[in-house]
Amino acid sequence: MRRSLKRIALKSFAVFSLLRLQNISMIVLAQYLCAVFIFAPQRSITQVIFDPNVIFLILASAMTIAAGYLINAFYDQEKDLINKPYVTMLGRHIPQRHKITAYFVLNFSAVVVSSAISFRAVLFFSAYIFSLWVYSHKVKRIPLWGNIAWSVLTLTPFLGLFIYFSSTDAHIWGHALFLFLIFWALAMIKDLRNLPGDLSQNYLTWPLVKGVSSSKYWVSGLLIATWLPAAWLLCSGSVGLMGYYFMLSIATVFPALWMLWRTQVAAGYQNVYNLLKLLIAIGVFSIVLMHWTA
């Protein structure tokens, strides 16, 4: 009995790890907050939250992202065994054939759910699914372009909301540019962190092709570039009390760069990565402050 419970617990943890449910939960929350406070501020909160099309769109996004994590883990298993040994060993409690089956089931379910919205939504999610596969199979191995592709794909679920609400607010592009630059920096920090595994599997990432210092200059430039959309949003007066978040983001660049240039080991890069992820998480919750003023 205890052995069975232990096996169930291990498989549950493995599923949680493979699907990165904590990341998906944060994306779902961010989508809902963006829908309410950015894309459709003229509607009531209940109108947006209980809009069937919004529910289906976010559900389809969550399924597609989960499938993307599965196929990415499938292709990166040998590399991750070096870079993330504990997580990878935990994932081995789920057979590869089950991962592939789940991948197709999740993608098929996403397309079916999107069909309840419109044919255009079906095309959108079909393209998103295909793009995630191409990224995992080929593009992620291309220096720099793999980082850019990851950043765009991470923003794609929010593009779906943008298309659905047909928003014309220019400030949305400011938010999108800010996030794109942060995601791009995160992608390059991941390459620095994952150097041992990438080297063993001959992944031609930017640090391996151009060197660690070149990658650090890129990350530094991207983080400093976030000041432009952050300052523009602050000066526009369109973000309410969320302006304090953009002030925080500008200030956070300094410790992030100090940590980045000071370290040469994976644990140090992971600390920079965690700091930026925390900044993004704070940004998600601060969206509710957009229409509040002092």
Image (cartoon, grey):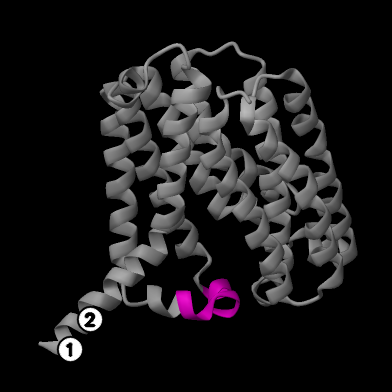
In the image, residue 74 lies in the stretch drawn in magenta: no
- Tell me: residue 110, above or below residue 67: above
Q: Which residue is mark 2?
A: 7
Numbered circle sitting on residue 225: none
Q: Amino acid at mark 2?
A: Arg
Side of 60 where 245 appears, left or right? right
C-alpha gap between disc 2 and disc 1: 6 Å
Q: Please provide percent x and percent y for residue 195.
A: 72, 72
Going 27% across and 48% down the picture, which residue do you hit?
105
* Residue in front for this viewpoint, 157 or 287: 287
Main SS category, magenta section: helix
- Picture disc at residue 3: 1
Q: Nearer the viewer, residue 183 or 287?
A: 287
Disc 1 packing (10 Å; few <14; some 14–19; many ≥20): few
Q: Position of residue 215 (x, y in %)?
A: 83, 59
Say if 272 sits above or below 25 in the image: below
Q: Residue at x 40, y 63 (%)?
A: 18
Furthest residue in direction front, as rendered: 294
Q: Which contiguous range is marked in magenta? A: 78-87
Residue beneath the point at 74% across and 18% down = 236
**Residue 191 occupies which quadrant of the picture?**
bottom right
Q: Quadrant of residue 259?
A: bottom right
Are the residues tagged 2 and 1 within 8 Å (C-beta)? Answer: yes
